[in-house]
Image (cartoon, rainbow, N blue to C red):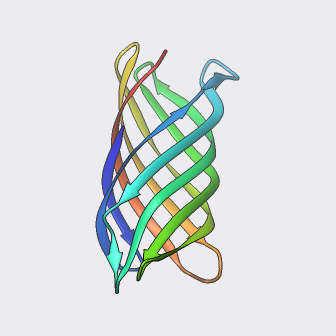
Amino acid sequence: MVLGYDNIQGSDGFTYGGSTGYDIAVTPRVTVGPEVSFSDSTTKDSGVHASRDLAASLRLGYVVTPQVLAFGKVGYANTRFEYAGAHQSLEGVRFGGGLEYAVTPRTYISAEYQRTEYEDDFGGRNAGLVGVGFRF
């Protein structure tokens, strides 16, 4: 589960959603793996509402301490924008990074920054997220 600040073309809002992924240890300190996410937003600008957001990314992590994982990611994003009873989906490139702190061996909290650059010179999106996650 993730919650956070959302900014699209200068308009502020709140974003919430979830993600799932899988980390593979390629060395004792380096991980790599896929991540998919789904979120929604309250951000509106001039009658345009940013709604459903789907993303698929590749994460690269580095174990800083046994409890702290620093990570970066890059991937694909697809966001639906609604306006005047219609909607349009835009694709873009999402990148960012953050930290995960292991509270227990199976539970972590996270903080992350994400940037999305959309097609058609639409502009970008910035998000600051905090989350709680579980490892299986």
- For residue 95, above or below residue 109: below
Determine which quarter of the picture holds residue 14.
bottom left
Q: Quadrant of the N terminus?
A: top left
Residue furthest to the bottom in view is 46
Residue furthest to the front in view is 85
Residue, x 33% and y 69% (percent of image)?
A: 43
- For residue 67, above or below residue 125: above
Q: Position of residue 63 (x, y in %)?
A: 52, 27
Q: Position of residue 5 (x, y in %)?
A: 31, 59
Using residue 78 as the reference point, say whether residue 131 is left or right of it. Answer: left
Residue, x 40% and y 13% (percent of image)?
A: 105
Q: Position of residue 17 (x, y in %)?
A: 39, 45
Using residue 19 as the reference point, say whether residue 104 is left or right of it. Answer: left
Determine which quarter of the picture holds residue 36.
top right
Residue, x 41% and y 33% (percent of image)?
A: 100
Residue, x 44% and y 18% (percent of image)?
A: 66
Q: Position of residue 19 (x, y in %)?
A: 48, 38
The image shows a total of numbered marks equal to 0
Residue furthest to the right in view is 26
Using residue 72 as the reference point, say whether residue 106 is left or right of it. Answer: left
